[in-house]
Image (cartoon, rainbow, N blue to C red):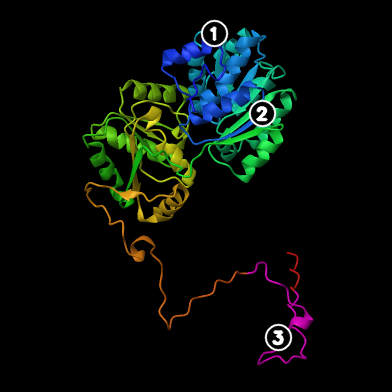
Amino acid sequence: MNTPTFASLGLAAPITNALNQLGYKTPTPIQSRALPLLIQGQDLLGIAQTGTGKTAAFSLPILHSIQVQGLRAAKARPLALILAPTRELAIQIHEDVQRYSAETSIRTTCIFGGANQHPQVRRLAKGVEILVATPGRLMDLEAQGHLALDAVQHFVLDEADRLLDMGFIGDIRKIEASLPSKRQTALFSATMSKEIRSLADFLLHDPQEIKVTPKQVTVEKIAQFQLRIANEHKQAALEQMLKQDDVRKVIVFTRTKHASERITKKLLKAGFSANAINGNKSQNARAKALDRFKRGADWILVATDVAARGIDIQGISHVINFELPQEPENYVHRIGRTARAGSTGVAWSLVDPSEKKQVQAIEKMTHSKIAPLDFEIAHALPIEATPTEFEPTRKFKPDQKKKSATKRKWPPKRKGPGDAKASNSQTPDAKPRRRPRRKPKKAA
């Protein structure tokens, strides 16, 4: 069977020319299966892990449709809407679509919160065929009258599972109500859940479903290792890891914004070139940090899960999990920032004894064991540790009774005559004692 090419899938010549200039010759599995269906105008539910080429899978058919029909959008009335959960992912999609449409006259723009809305409003007023947006800013500008969605012919939800995790389900339903009923809708997600299935049933009409997520969830070209080490020694271990010869460009992931700032400050103090990106940063600061990281001005980026999806930067040699995420799916997205475009990569995880359950959940989901780190780090703990080292529990002696937890009832129930209890000074037939009447105070 011949390997398909982008030209053989029926894309318009200006689009295939742009792809050739970018060096894209052969479509990925998700692209080769999604493109024909979307070009035919069908609704689609696509399940594929991060780094498989989903952006091209849904954007190329939109560009093809607009190009072959010669469509032109009216002012503030886009023809295609792509929703993304984060600003970083929205910007990444926008930049990719611009590259794919370089040899066409199709206009695209990106709107997101955390930035001045006036430049975004001006671009919308000029007219754009494709709009990439985060839900919050989209609804704000629509409510202000700067945007209308009644001309949308193509509607895409990218990283739908992340949109639901971030609580955007209500916004998605409101946005859907503003769209024409006659449209093409595509929903892409890295994972499938009951909530995703319910959302797909709500949005899609007689959809085709494709799933290219392999049983081996993580990218095979990523070498994964773990280091058991207590939290208080993680910073020193991180700095020792960053001094390894093969470490060139690194993303360090943390769970919290505060941790990302703290770690960055300590790295800078130790002489490393680092920057931080998290939800507390302004959009300009985040964009500047990403740009410096892309250009190599900083070779370490310390980030929260805001950068776990949609950051497509070539040359990232290592991903280091300073703290493991609570959800195992986020681990897959994190390490997917390396080994891009067919290259190889390395993922290291610093695991405190309290994070053992997260490791087990990750290994269960990925169907593989995370190997111990293959070089020595100070204060490292053994992987095969006794249960008491990693699961400290209070043990009771055989003759020691565990106190039962009882809830104190408040307010106390007022006792009536029938509730009077017998005592040494009171028989069951005795009347309950009454509180003596308070004597009125004499007038002065």
The residue identified by callout 3 is 421
Point 40% across, 53% down: residue = 355
Checking the image for residue 170, the label placed there is none
Where is 372 relative to 300, above or below? below
Q: Is residue 358 above or below residue 431?
A: above
> Is residue 427 located in the magenta-colored stretch of the structure?
yes
Q: Name the residue beneath numbered marker 2.
A: 43
Instruction: Give the residue type that dot 3 points to.
Output: Lys
Q: Earlier in the sequence, mark 2 or mark 3?
A: 2
**Could you tell me residue 395's position as x and y percent?**
40, 73
Q: Earlier in the sequence, mark 1 or mark 3?
A: 1
Q: Is residue 390 above or below residue 293?
A: below
Measuring from the top left, give residue 439's x and y in whole percent: 75, 73
- Going from the N terminus, do you reach mark 1 or mark 2 first? 2
Image quarter in which the C terminus is found: bottom right
Read off the residue under disc 1.
104
Is residue 410 one of those drawn in magenta? yes
Span shown in magenta? 409-437
Q: Secondary structure at mark 3?
A: loop
Kindly indicate whether the residue at mark 3 contacts the one at mark 1 (C-beta within 8 angstroms): no
Residue type of the residue flagged with mark 2 = Asp
**Residue 212's spot in the image, x, y percent?**
52, 36
Three-letter amino acid code at the position of disc 1: Thr
The answer to whether any part of residue 128 appears in the image is no
Q: Tell me the element at label 2.
A: loop
Circle 3 residues within 10 Å: few <14, some 14–19, many ≥20:
few
For residue 129, side relative to residue 253 (left or right): right
Name which residue lies at 53% across and 10% down.
13
